[in-house]
Amino acid sequence: MISRISTGSFRRLSKSGCPPCASHIARRQTHSSKALSAAVARPDGRKEGDISSVFRSLSGGADEQLDARYADLKQRLLGVNKEALIASWDRLLERLREEIQTIHDQGSSVIPQIDFKDIQQPSKDFKNALERRGVAVIRGVIPEHEARDYKAEVEAYVKANPWTKGNFTPPLTI
């Protein structure tokens, strides 16, 4: 849980809502030191933001043989109705091609937007777009000057605490 305090900075609270005690702070500092050294010392030589370790095909690692249960599952799925499964896959690929073209044509406007003041009575077009996309941008929730202050505060925090950038896992709270 994070609470805003009067100085304009943020302070992490424990789950019970109390400010962290000395043991919380010590634990966080130890964890932060580990995170900093992990973020700085990359023994695998990957650059910051590299996600190749998540995907076997990008990692350069050897493929591993999967358990036989996966082959059995695949055979059971194909055995039910192979033609229907292939037709379903083809329909999915066609829909993906259409959606990719829509995103290419519309860019970021493909995501519906609404002003916070209009949220109680959204237009029919907005409702339809929200149902189709499953996500929306709500503008005007926080005044612009306040949002800019938040952004500046976060940037200052990241600058003062470089381990928060990249390969950082937040410290545990009790």
Image (cartoon, rainbow, N blue to C red):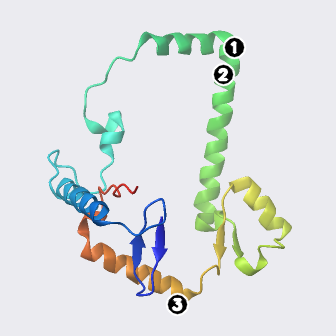
Mark in the foreground, 1 or 3: 3
Amino acid type of disc 2?
Leu
Task: Point out residue 153 in the picture as x, y percentages from the top left corner.
Answer: 39, 81
Do the CB atoms of the residues marked 3 and 2 lie less than 8 Å apart?
no
Give the distance between the C-alpha atoms of the residues marked 1 and 3, in whole angstroms.
59 Å
Amino acid type of disc 1?
Asn
Question: Is residue 77 toward the left or the right of residue 62 in the image?
Answer: right
Kind of element beneath mark 1: helix
> Which residue is the site of mark 1?
81
Q: Quadrant of residue 133?
A: bottom right
Point out the tag, 1 or 3, that comes first from the N-terminus: 1
* Residue at image point 73% right, 60% down: 130
Q: Quadrant of residue 165?
A: bottom left
Residue extending furthest toward the bottom:
145
Neighbours of disc 3 within 10 Å: few (<14), some (14-19), many (20+): few
Kind of element beneath mark 2: helix
Amino acid type of disc 3?
His
Point out the tag, 3 or 2, that comes first from the N-terminus: 2
> Which residue is the site of mark 2?
85
